[in-house]
Image: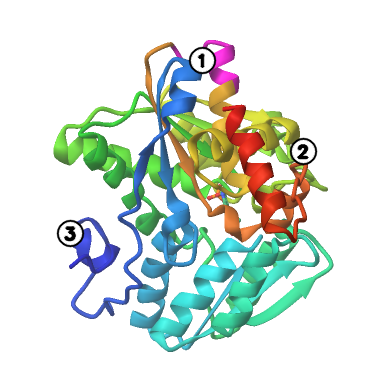
Amino acid sequence: MYEGLLKQYKEYLPITDKTPMISLAEGNTPLIPLHSLSKELGINLYGKYEGLNPTGSFKDRGMVMAVAKAVEEGAKAIVCASTGNTSAAAAAYATRAGVKAYVVIPDGKIAMGKLAQAIIYGADIISIPGNFDEALKAVRDIAKTEAVALVNSVNPYRLEGQKTAAFEVCEQLGQAPDVLAIPVGNAGNISAYWKGFKEWHDKKGTLLPRMHGFEAEGAAAIVKGEVIEQPETIATAIRIGNPASWKLAEAARDESKGHIDSVTDEEILNAYRKVAAQDGVFVEPGSAASLAGVIQHVKNGKIKPGETVVAVFTGNGLKDPDTAINATDVKISKMSDLEEMRMHLRNGVSEL
Ligand code: F0G
C-alpha cells in the first residue's frame, strides 16, 4: 500500500528516528499525457496533476515534511501566510499531527474552495487588509517571538518535501523531460523541482530538464527585476510581488539554461479553458500559467517541435469554481419535458 511521501522517499528526506511519519497518502500523482494539446502544439506534452493531492494542491508535499519536522522539534502550533493552498494544506496536516494551525490570508483574494478547506479542517483563520507579501512579512515577524513554527516555503523542509515531485516525474517518464514548465508565485516550487532533478541526476543518472517558470504579468517581479508593490492577476494563487525564493528561482533558471517569463491573464484563461475542454483536465487558474507559458514558448521557439514537456498543474480546478463559471459562456438549457429533451439530444447528435 502506498503510504505517502515520507515513507516513499525516506532516504532522500531529512528524516530521523524521531520524525513522526505523518501521511495523508500525498504524492504519487498522475502524469497525464495531453493528447489533443500535444498534437496541436507539435510536442509531447504531459500534465503533472498535483491537483490530485489530498488537499488538492502540490502544497501537501512540502507541508507533510514541514509539519513532521515542526512536531519533531516540539512545536504545538504552526503558522503560515497564504494565497489559499498553503493554508489548506497547513490546516489539514496540523489536524493530522495534532497541532494548531494559524493561517493568514489576504482579505477577499482567496478562492472559495481554499477558504472552505481552511474552515472545515479547523484552522484559526486571520484575514488582513494587505496582500500575500504583507501577510508573509507579518508571519515571519510573529514566528520570531511566538512559540509557533513558520511553515511557509522559507522553511527549508517545505522545499525538501516538494522536490519529490521531480523524482516522480523522472520515474514516470523513465527520464527527465526536455522542459519542465511551472507557475511561479513565491518561487519555492520551481526551486524545489530543480533541487529534485539535480538529486535524481546525481543518484540515478537521469538528465536535467530546462526549467521554464511563468509569472502572471501583473505579478512578474522576477521577470521585471523589481518588487511589485500591488500585484494583480486573476490567478490569485500566484498574486505575489516579492517572491521569497527569488534568488533560488533565478539559479534554477540559469543553471538549467531555462527561462522565467510572464503570461497575461488572457493567456492564462485561454490555457485554463483549453486544457479542460480539449484534454479533460480541470486545473486552477494559477496552474494554467504553466500551460499558457508552454503555448507561448512553442510559438516563440523557446520550446522546439517534438520536445518532451511536463507542465506542472499545481492545483485542482475545483478550488476556484467562481473563475470557471465566470470565464466561460455558461450555457444551461432549462427543460421540464421529456419530449423536449429527446428532441434536444436528437438534434444535437444529428450534427455530430
Ligand atoms: N500554483 C498554485 C496553485 C499555488 O497555490 C502556488 C502558490 C503556486 C502555483 C506558486 O508556487 O509559490 O512555490 O512559486 N501558492 C502559495 C499559497 C503562495 O499560499 O498557497 P510557488
Q: Which residue of the protein is positioned furthest toward the front in this rendering?
A: 339
Tell me the tag on residue 302: 1
> Disc 2 designates what residue?
218
Work out how far the residue at label 2 is from the one at label 3, CA to CA, in angstroms. 40 Å
Secondary structure at numbered mark 2: helix
> Disc 3 designates what residue?
11
For badge 3, the amino acid type reads Glu
From the image, which quarter does the N terminus lie in? bottom left
**Residue at left 50%, top 69%?**
89
For badge 2, the amino acid type reads Gly
Going from the N terminus, do you reach mark 2 or mark 3 first?
3
Secondary structure at numbered mark 3: helix
**Residue at left 81%, top 63%?**
130
Secondary structure at numbered mark 1: loop
Q: What is the x, y in percent for residue 270?
A: 67, 32
Work out how far the residue at label 1 is from the one at label 2, CA to CA, in angstroms. 22 Å
- The residue carrying mark 3 has its beta carbon less than 8 Å from ligand 1: no
